[in-house]
Amino acid sequence: SACRSFMQPYRIFLFLLLVVKTFLNADSMQVCSRDALSQKKCGPCSRTDGQSLTMETAKAQLAELKEGWYLTNDGQRIRKDWKVRNFKVGMAFLQQVGDIAEEEGHHPDFHLEGYQYVAIEIWTHSIGGLSENDFILAAKIDEVPVELSKKQPKRKVEESSS
């Protein structure tokens, strides 16, 4: 009985410590410029300690990337669409991005449709949402040259429910 009453405050302390740590980690990413992101290296993410970025942080970081990236899946992913000159240009672009993704150890989803519509969607699979790695990879993708079609589709609007 005396042991139980001694352990109860300790358990409450551990619980509160866990809550505070979770709260702090959920938004621990500082918003970086596109140039700063492109100089970083993607780090390992784990299911146990990785927290998705908050919608507020994701939107702030998104504003630092080159135009065209937008949130999808209720703010859990970022995506960018390109209309490239032709199929061969699209494949070459995706190969270059694939090489970067392999180097970073962070792999996006690729889409090539209608022979010239390229889309890349990024999220951290292990945490089921966005992490700093996603924005690092997006900034590096934006540095890859790509020959666009003369006629570009209208820019998509954010598809997340805020």
Image (cartoon, rainbow, N blue to C red):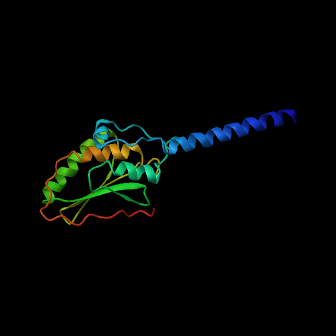
Q: Quarter of the image for the C terminus: give it.
A: bottom left
Relative image position of residue 113 (x, y in whole percent): 23, 64
Q: Quarter of the image for the N terminus: give it.
A: top right
Q: Residue at x 48, y 44 (%)?
A: 27
Relative image position of residue 49 (x, y in whole percent): 52, 40
Image height check: is 114 above or below 91?
below
- Left or right: 122 in relation to 112: right
Of residues 3 and 162, the one nearer the viewer is 162
- Left or right: 100 in relation to 58: left
Relative image position of residue 152 (x, y in whole percent): 18, 64
Q: Residue at x 54, y 41 (%)?
A: 24
The quarter of the picture where residue 91 lies is: bottom left
Relative image position of residue 37 (x, y in whole percent): 32, 40
Q: Residue at x 13, y 56 (%)?
A: 88
- Left or right: 50 in relation to 145: right
Q: Residue at x 56, y 44 (%)?
A: 23
Count how many numbered circles sit on residues in the image. 0
Of residues 109 and 140, the one nearer the viewer is 140
